[in-house]
Amino acid sequence: MARRVAVIGAGVSGLSSIKCCLDEDLEPTCFERSNDIGGLWKFTVANYVSPQETSKDGMTRVYKSLVTNVCKEMSCYSDFPFQEDYPNFMNQGKFWYYLQEFAEHFDLLKYIRFRTTVCSVTKRPDFSETGQWDVVTETEGKQERAVFDAVMVCTGHFLNPHLPLESFPGIHNFTGQILHSQEYRSPEGFQGKRVLVIGLGNTGGDVAVELSRTAAQVLLSTRTGAWVICRSSEWGYPYNMVVTRRCLNFIAQVLPSCVLNWIQEKKMNKRFNHEHYGLSITKGARKIIVNDELPTCILCGTVTMKTSVKEFTETSAVFEDGTVEENIDTVIFATGYTFSFPFLEEPLKSLCTKKIFLYKQVFPSNLERATLAIIGLISIKGSILAGTELQARWATRVFKGLCKIPPTQKLMAEATKKEQLIKRGVMKDITKDKLEFIPYMDDLAACIGTKPSVPILFLKDPRLAWEVFFGPCTPYQYRLLGPGKWDGARNAILTQWDRTLKPLKTRTIPDSTKPACMSHYLKLGGVPILLASLLLIYKSSLFFKLVRDHLQVRISPYLISIW
């Protein structure tokens, strides 16, 4: 059984991995190459680089104005809610402070070795029997070797900027400034310039909007378009809390995908027509970004939408639709990142970059012993923090032998078969799509034994069951039962709307208080709730079986036969 665990990285997933190790009585040692926790969420004045400079350490960090895309109730650690007066969506400083609070509350800092780089992680000669790893680290020029029973890689998605210059003919003749969004920190230095942003993801949209306040003109080029949603939804409630609900997930599993897509597209076009704004999405694509201001910037002309860039000249950009934009001063590539694991040995290093060979996006399929876990290498329709925490909870129990995974021969055979089918065009590579939040979380929770059972909850605690099924699927739901059960989970779920509304109530109005809980659901989804209820009743043979089994010990056999 594993005891000593190496955790690589002290960001969001690294911190949860340390805590999960401690929860399972394992001995974690975390190696962090910077001088503080938080990973890319750490921003200080010392981190700032001007547009003419590049980050000296090459680490990816957030830009100063970044605001979270997922609200606080959906993106907290499952046994450590945000303080009730924290805003629902917060800037990087506030979010980093929450990470600091989490680390201090659970006394995690003493397990972290800062300014330490992991040089290599290799199998021990007796790996097939012990599952142990040799880990070589370097601190201030001095190398050290240690043996660990397990390794948790928490380096995340955002390691190496993807800068596809070869896809843009003439870019090397361009005389203006070329940046990747990794190097962007603030709009200082862009005053009065004509800026072209390439790539419409969350970062591309944010950078374009912020620069539109200081630059002479911002052009935003996109190949596929995107659906643009706001942080607030109907009645002003956080969007994530409105759409991430078990009742809606239940409906999604029953209705045909074409019907669901039609409903979603109609709803997203209700706020503004994406085609009119130059944002219409390529057929078959499901790209969604969060941006409250982009439509307004387009409406005001401070951001101009453009098609893909065909080629560059010395001072201009030629687009696929034949239009030309002259006198471009700066091009910012918001083209994402590639991930790698330079400290791993081959063939493990290459295999880990192929998500199809990661069992449930965590365990490499080719290891005889499941003692290395990739934590946080997921793209999910919801909180990455919540997803990585559940990954870490599962991984540590696998390390201890309390949870089992299929043998490596079976995993490799299945992954190889899928890879071949994808290459032949028979199967779609779903690893490139964002994971559905509730199904993925439930899948991991089922492995651990912490997936909540709605029918049983309705029998034991109807009020809580109502919140779990019809309310937002907050991380607390995965602390209600099983390993890692938290006594405060029930109360956290029942008071989640209170914490949501608390930071908004800064102006007290006499006689304005109203009962909150039930009204949220009636406002946000009377029709979905009714539909989900009918579908649940229709497909509830299991529910009634559970009711019968539960009552069998309390009611006479005669009454059971009547049932």
Image: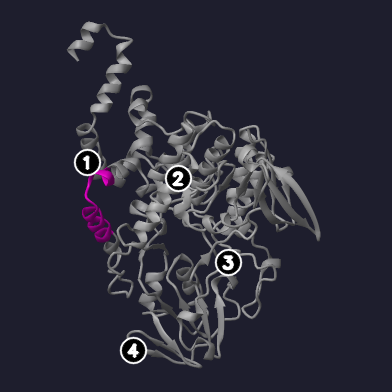
Task: Give the colour scheme shown.
Answer: one colour
* Residue 519 is inside the magenta segment: no
- Residue named by callout 4: 322
Bounds of the magenta span? 251-267
Alpha carbon distance from label 2 to label 1: 39 Å
Q: Which residue is mark 1?
A: 531
**In which quadrant of the rendered image does the C terminus lie?**
top left
Earlier in the chain: of badge 4 and badge 3, it is: 3
Question: Could you tell me which secondary element the residue under label 1 belongs to?
Answer: helix
Q: Element under label 3?
A: strand
Q: Which residue is mark 3?
A: 160
Labels 2 and 1: the sequence-earlier one: 2
Viewer-nearest of discs 2 and 4: 2
Q: Amino acid at mark 1?
A: Leu
Identify residue for label 2. 411
Let me know if residue 473 appears in the view.
yes
Determine whether, in the image, residue 495 is placed left or right of residue 228: right
